[in-house]
Each structure stands twice: as C-alpha cells, then as structure tokens.
Amino acid sequence: MARDPRFDVLFEPVRIGPVTAPNRFYQVPHCTGMGYRRPQSLAALREMKAEGGWGTVCTEYCSIHPSSDDEPFPSASLWDDEDIDWHALMVDKVHAHGALAGVELWHGGAGSANHYSREAPLGPTSMPAGVNDPVQTRAMDKADIRELKRWHVEAARRAQRAGFDIVYVYAAHWYLIRQFLLPSNQRSDEYGGTLENRARLLRELIIETKEAIGDTCAVAVRFSASTSGEDDDQDTEEPREMLELLSDLPDLWDITVHDYSYEMGTSRFVEEAGLEATMSWVKGVTDKPVVSVGRFTSPETMLRLVRQGVIDLIGAARPSIAGAFLPQIIAEGRDDEIRECIGCNICYTGDQTGTPIRCTQNPTMGEEWRKGWHPEQIPLKGSEARILIVGGGPAGLEAAMSLGKRGYDVTLAEARRELGGRVTLESALPGLAQWARVRDWRLNQIDKLPNVEFYRESVVDEEQILEFAPDRVVIATGAKWRRDGIGRWHETPIPGWDTPSVITPDDIMAGAIPTGPVVVFDDDHYYMGGVIAEALRRTGLDVTLATPANEVSTWTTHTEEQYRIQARILGLGIALETGTSLASVNEGSVILKSIHTGQTKKVEAANVVMTTSRLPQDALYYALADRVAIQRIGDCLAPGTIATAVYSGHRAAREMDAEVPIGVPFRRE
Ligand code: ADP
Ligand code: SF4
C-alpha cells in the first residue's frame, strides 16, 4: 500500500549544521541499561532503529569523565581513547542504514554520586549529590570549570573520531550544566547569580565544542523549556530568556521539560504530545531546527506538529523502542500496523535496575545481539506440527501471532468471548486504556494470517485436547489473584481470609462492586493495588489502602510514576496506611498492624481486596504434562508483568523446533 502523500513531509531531509538527517524521525538519546557494560548489545539495538527507518539514532547519556559516574545506572562513556572503538561499532552500524549517529555527552554533576569511580562529585556549589545518597559535591572553582570544558572538548573530539554526526551539550534534566542554569546557582563569580552568568558555562561549552568539531559534526543542545510548575502550566519564563540569549549558537535544540515524570509520563498520567503546551514557543525564538518528544505514535500528530511549526524533527525514545520500524511502516502506508507504545515505562525499569532494556510491546528489544532476535523477522517453521494454544492473553496471543508468522497451523482456544486476557480486563481500569494496544496490535497482525484460528468462548479441558490431538500444546491460561493474602509479607494465610467479604482484583475486574467501606491490601507493590483503590474510590466508596511498604506502589519508582500515584491516591481522599500488614479479617472490619511498632487498629470494611500475589492456572498443564508434547507460558508459567508474558509467548514461538543453546540461553559480552 502506498503511503498517503500528506505524510511525505515526515520523510523530508532536515539540515542540522554540517550534516543532514535523511528524514524527520529522530531517536533522541535514551538509556538502555547497557551503556559501556554491553557495547555489542547496544550497537545491535541502535542498528535496528536505523534499519527500521529512524533517520537519526543517538546513544544514551555518555559520561565525559570519571567524575561523572552514574553507577548502578549504566551510562555510556568517552573517558579516554579506549572508549572510542565500541562507539565506532555502533556508529558504523547506524551509518550502514543511511542514518545519522548522535552522542549525548554528559556530566552528571550533583546528579551522580560516583559510587564506582569514587571521585568527589562536582557541582556549582556544595550540594547533596546522587539520589538521596549521603554525599555532597565539592563546589567547582575556576580551575574545575576550565577542566570541565577541557574534558568536554576532548570527549567531543573522541566522538568525532568514532564517527558521530551529532554531538550534544547536555543542559537538561538534573545534571551539571542545568545545575548551573537554574536560579539555585548563586555562585558569587561570573558563573552564577544573574541569568547571563548562569548561562555562561553552557554558552562557552557550545562555542568550544563547535570550534573543536563543528567542521564535521552538528552540535545539539538538550535544554529544558521550563523550570517548575504543573504539567500543562509550567513556568517557561527563564528558559525563554536563556534560549533567546543562545538562540542560534547550536545547530539543533532538543527540548525537554523540567519534570521527568511528565516528559516521560506513563499513559496513566500523560497524553501523547504532552510537552507541546510547554515548548511550542521554542521555534519562535530560534532559526535552528527543533526536536522534542511526546510519545508520538500517531502519524497525524507528527504531521500536525511539523506543519504547525512546533518541531522539525519527531523526537522519540519509547515509540522507537516499541516501534523500531515505525518510520518504515509509515513510509509503506501501513499505519494500522504501527506497534504503538502503550506508555507503561517498563523500558525505563531496565536502566533503573541496572539491567538491559525490555519492552512490553516489543519482546525483541534488547535481544537483538544476545539472541539474534529481529522485531520484523522470524525464521520459518521447523516442522509441520499443528499447534493448539489454550488462553488468549498477552502470552497466548503473542505465541499465536509469532507461530503464525513462522507458518505453523495454529488454533487458539479462549474461555472468554473477548480475547486479550488480563490486558483486556486491566485496560478497563482507570488510566490503563492504552494497554489494550498489546491486544489490538496482535489481533490486527493475526487477522492477516490465514493459518491462525480462534475458538472463543471455549473452555478447553483435558479430554478435548486429547480428542483434538494437536502435535503441540501451549498452555497460556494465566494466573489468578490469591484470596488468602499470602504474598511477600504474609507467608501463611491471613486469619479470616475465607470470610465472604474478601475479594480479589479479579473479582473487581469481573464486575464485583463492594457495598461499603473497602480496604485494599497491597502486598504486590506494582500498579494493581493503587489502581484498584482508585477505581473503587471513583465509585464514591470510602477506601483505605494498606501496604507493608513505606510508600504506595513502591516498584513504580522504576517506572517514574510513584510520586504521581501517591499524589493521586492522597488527592482522591483514599486513606493511606503504609508500613502496615493485615493481621486479620472479620465480618465488617479488619485489623491492621504496624510492621514497625506492632500496634493494631480496627478499620471498618465491608470488603477487603487482597492484592498480594497470584496463583498460576496450571492444572491443565499438569493434567497433560507427561502425556502430550506440552509447555506452559506467560503467567501460567510464572506470574509477572505483561512484558514478561509477551516475552514468554514470543520465546516459545521462536524456540519451537529450533536449536536452543544448552545452558546459558544467550550470548554474553
Ligand atoms: P497471560 O498474561 O499469561 O497471557 P492471562 O491471564 O492474561 O495470561 O490470559 C489467560 C487467558 O487464558 C484468559 O483470557 C483466560 O480466559 C484463558 N483461559 C484460562 N483457562 C482456560 C481454558 N481452560 N480454556 C480456554 N481459555 C482459558
Ligand atoms: Fe512503550 Fe512500555 Fe515499550 Fe516502554 S516498555 S516502549 S513504555 S510499550
């Protein structure tokens, strides 16, 4: 199918200083949890974006000196010449597909605690460093500032030798250059105090970087369009003045906002193109090209923003992670096939936990080198086996789609009328609507495959499977929330768990409506407890959210959501009991118990929603385990995230009739 000529504008080249981006699709710098530790994995990951049509592909933040070390979060580095080769590896792979390669030179300043290098962190003044780490920076003197500029220029020269086309001066987020820009920088010398003084370091870095490498490389500046304020009402006054001061110095402005949880907000809190209101003024004060992000997956939105002169380049981190081939798919007019990011931020949890990136929508993300997985290609089938999949949740659908693409004859039986399993159910909860994209993209793909057949409203049992006699059976029957309260805190059933007032998130999602005050007991710590509490509160019920953790939904610190979730819970008037276990359930009430003091408290509760852990629905698997060729996948194998289920389904499909390494199942660096 030819693309709509309206979208041709997205494929126009854009001049950026001495280089030209072949199109407007620009993968902005984004972390991968790989950094300098996993260069081969990283090079293959970036190459895949270039192959998929991203006209510019950047690294993650790249440290210029050991005084900026972000361990345990893995950054890239250009500390000395030894670091050049592995960057060149990535650059060559990106260039091979005609894309530009960019590097985001970075000094963390007070943003890094330097756990690895043990260098004293640097800052414009002596201030707390790292993330609640018990260390402070040393205030930079003039000699330090000169040194910083030298490191930056030397790193830029190394970047040029590695072959990069775009080199960043990174003045955004909570890192060193921005620490100089902000009003909190009240140094008494010419680098602090007035706005001009605070902008001096950035100005000098841009000029010196351009002098050093500007003959062949574009110099980009990543800059925040705001200094404070709420979501759509951010304070842009100072950034505007500063940008006016520096307007045509760099070759490209890469614009962000002050609040990272908004910039990369999950779909639970932030819409597509969320930054527009804060940054749409930027092109009015510079003649240089502007790139910015906004979880863009709609070609219409991209087109509108370019046409309206808001941005020149479509910045993307997450849309390029879920949709490594998004530009190519738009180029070919297959817009309905865009693998749209769902805005869950599972990709960010890799960096946050110091592990390679993963993605809910794209199970091949991070596996390009170590497993040789390609997001758009999968080997043909290895046999004529007929395959029965039981369960149409994310695991079952991914397996059906991938096996179908391999050419197998696939039958999928699903108990419910609606496909999608937990994704269908959970996407009906507040804020999670976009998660349905996990189901919808797969159904759309399967629709194009003649060899995948669905049986809906078909509860499959042991006899039926034996009678159907497929060559292989894949059990993807999911998991159910436990009723007895066993989880991380309670290792044995909570006394009174079997009273009728105890329900689970599955009951709520199936339509159960509590009749009076509710206690949600969250010992799961990801999103479910908070979302259920929110859903119930929005029906007008009195809700108490109790959790043994010291904050709500504590794992969501990794998805950059925790503050927003806690703010929403408190804002809705949900009573919060942190550091609290559930001592017992009685008819009409519960006894909560402080995990710190042991003090108990009686709380009225017509219902208790146990959100603690899940039980795999694996009876069918065990009933047939030794009798037919059978395997289980997804939550039925081991309950986890939707990303885990999709990955599990994909892996099962890839490994069907394939040679799988014995022992370590992937290549290591
Ligand atoms: P996962 O996340 O592993 O994909 P889900 O819980 O989302 O798991 O999906 C499991 C799906 O399996 C659900 O849609 C459920 O209705 C379906 N299912 C469970 N048991 C059976 C069965 N015996 N026959 C058919 N479908 C089943
Ligand atoms: Fe989008 Fe989630 Fe994939 Fe990240 S993990 S790219 S947020 S779908």
Image: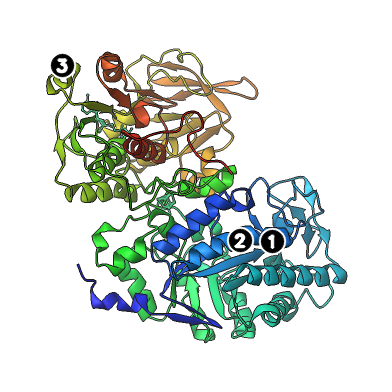
Question: What amino acid type is highlighted by mark number 3?
Answer: Glu
The percent position of residue 457, horizontal first and vertical second, equals 14, 31
**Which residue corresponds to the image point at 74% horizontal and 46% vertical from the top-left?**
115
Q: What kind of element bears circle 2?
A: helix
Q: What kind of element bears circle 3?
A: helix
The percent position of residue 256, horizontal first and vertical second, equals 54, 67
Identify the mark at residue 463; answer none if there is no mark.
Answer: 3
- Which quadrant of the rendered structure holds the N terminus? bottom left
Question: What amino acid type is highlighted by mark number 2?
Answer: His
Q: Is residue 169 visible?
A: no
Q: Earlier in the sequence, mark 1 or mark 2?
A: 1
**In-front residue for pair 425/402:** 402
Figure check: 246 above or below 439: below
Check whether the beta carbons of the residues at disc 1 and disc 2 lie within 8 A of each other: yes
Please tell me whether mark 2 or mark 3 is closer to you in this view.
2
The percent position of residue 611, horizontal first and vertical second, equals 42, 28
**In-front residue for pair 275/372:** 372
Q: Which residue is mark 1?
A: 78
Identify the mark at residue 87; answer none if there is no mark.
Answer: 2
In-image side of 514 versus 446 (left or right): right
Q: Is residue 554 visible?
A: yes
Figure check: 545 above or below 202: above
Q: CA distance from mark 2 to mark 3?
A: 57 Å
Question: What amino acid type is highlighted by mark number 1?
Answer: Leu
**Which residue corresponds to the image point at 43% horizontal and 17% vertical from the top-left?**
585
The crowding category of the residue bearing disc 2, from other C-alpha atoms within 10 Å (few below 14, some 14 to 19, many at least 20), is many
The crowding category of the residue bearing disc 1, from other C-alpha atoms within 10 Å (few below 14, some 14 to 19, many at least 20), is many
Please tell me whether mark 3 or mark 1 is closer to you in this view.
1
- Quadrant of residue 424 in the image? top left
**Which residue corresponds to the image point at 36% horizontal and 60% vertical from the top-left?**
325
Q: Earlier in the sequence, mark 2 or mark 3?
A: 2
